[in-house]
Image (tube, grey):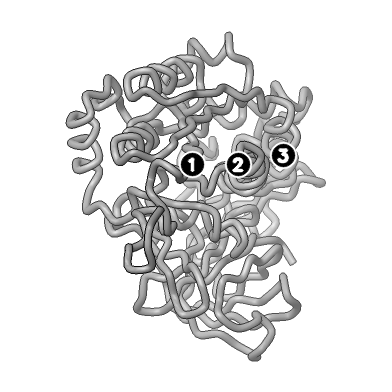
Amino acid sequence: MLDDTTKLNSLGFAKPPSETRVVVAMSGGVDSSVVAAQLAEEGYDVVGVTLQLYDHGAALAKKGACCAGIDIHDARRVAEEMGFPHYVLDYENIFQEAVIDEFADSYLAGATPVPCIRCNERVKFKDLLQTAKDLEADCMATGHYIQRKMGPNGPELHCAADASRDQSYFLFSTTPEQLEYLRFPLGHLPSKAETRKLAQKYGLAVADKPDSQDICFVPNGNYASVIEKLRPGAAEPGQIVHADGRVLGEHNGVIHYTIGQRRGLGIGGLSEPLYVVRLDVDAKQVIVGPKELLSTRTIPVREINWLGDTPFTSQPEWHVSVKVRSTRPPREAIIRPLTDTTAEVELLTAEEGVSPGQACVFYETGGSRILGGGWIWKG
């Protein structure tokens, strides 16, 4: 046993690594494999868990996405090489109900959903986290690029040291209770190259495995084809209408368009460049207009998860920075709480292409801390 003068171990527990059980969520990629290998080498009681999220046979043929058949094999091989137990859990029904069905419905409603956030929120950090507790693990570790730091009021969520790998946009809905239990061992690394170096150091076969690019159940980024399979008859034709009311042409389904889209509208021969500015699902209309119509300064946000030190409604407004898309830098904004979980966000500088279904993530201005976030909706 440790005495009072002994420091906490690398996962923050006052006991030897050998007495600290950690469940590692293993996707089969290099990031989570390195986390598992590193913790095993440090002497922790590691248990690897991989989720089977959809049909294994179909997944085997799919490249470039996580949690497919080949990835399960890769995760199992890492566990064998490093000498810790590994389990594959069938989460197909949970994933279908918690992620895929909502993805299809929100897309059909004219939104631009981010299913990776829902997967973290409803599957990995909920059901899998509970499984880790059932296995009597002290904590659960993942390969996400984000940092967990201890603050005066408990654990805080911070951006990854490598801004180009930062996954905070996809993890804003992590609750304080989940954050107590989660660990992110890669968040402090300066680059993905360092992760691959560690994989080579541990002799992992996945050291040079390419990163997954697609949403795992959307082959080649073709959202529309997936929606058509999930919701037959969804691609009903309609009109492409200018914001001033002119009918400019026909489309073969609202699901083929996204807010801000310019290319592939099928309405050539016009003097001005036009963008998709709104999708009217009920009227089966794609509304297009000039770029300035995409500019937005006021954003209604709901389902807010707040990670600040004082209650969300404890003050009338919060001066923060926000991200309205994962690929955009944070912009200064004012959040005005309406309830504990709804707010109006005012951008100090207008943003283009703000779309219902995307997340609006809150950041400490000038700092790395994530203060939470919510979902953009139509109001």
Q: Splitting the image into 4 quarters, where does residue 19 fall?
A: top left
Does the residue at mark 1 contact the one at mark 3 (Cβ under 8 Å)?
A: no
Question: Residue 321 in the image: x percent, y percent?
Answer: 45, 75
Calculate the distance from the C-alpha at mark 1 to the C-alpha at mark 2. 7 Å
Q: Nearer the viewer, mark 1 or mark 3?
A: 1
Which residue was labeled with disc 1? 21
Secondary structure at badge 3 equals helix
Q: Which badge, 1 or 3, comes first in the chain's sequence?
A: 1
116 or 82, nearer to the observer: 82
Q: Is residue 210 above or below residue 39?
A: above
Secondary structure at badge 2 equals loop
Label 1, residues with CA under 10 Å away: few <14, some 14-19, many ≥20: some
Question: Residue 375 in the image: x percent, y percent?
Answer: 64, 60
Which residue was labeled with disc 2? 136
Which residue was labeled with disc 3? 98
In the picture, the disc for residue 7 is none
Does the residue at mark 1 contact the one at mark 2 (Cβ under 8 Å)?
A: yes
| Badge 1 amino acid | Arg
Q: Is residue 202 visible?
A: yes
> As drawn, is 44 to the left or to the right of 282?
left
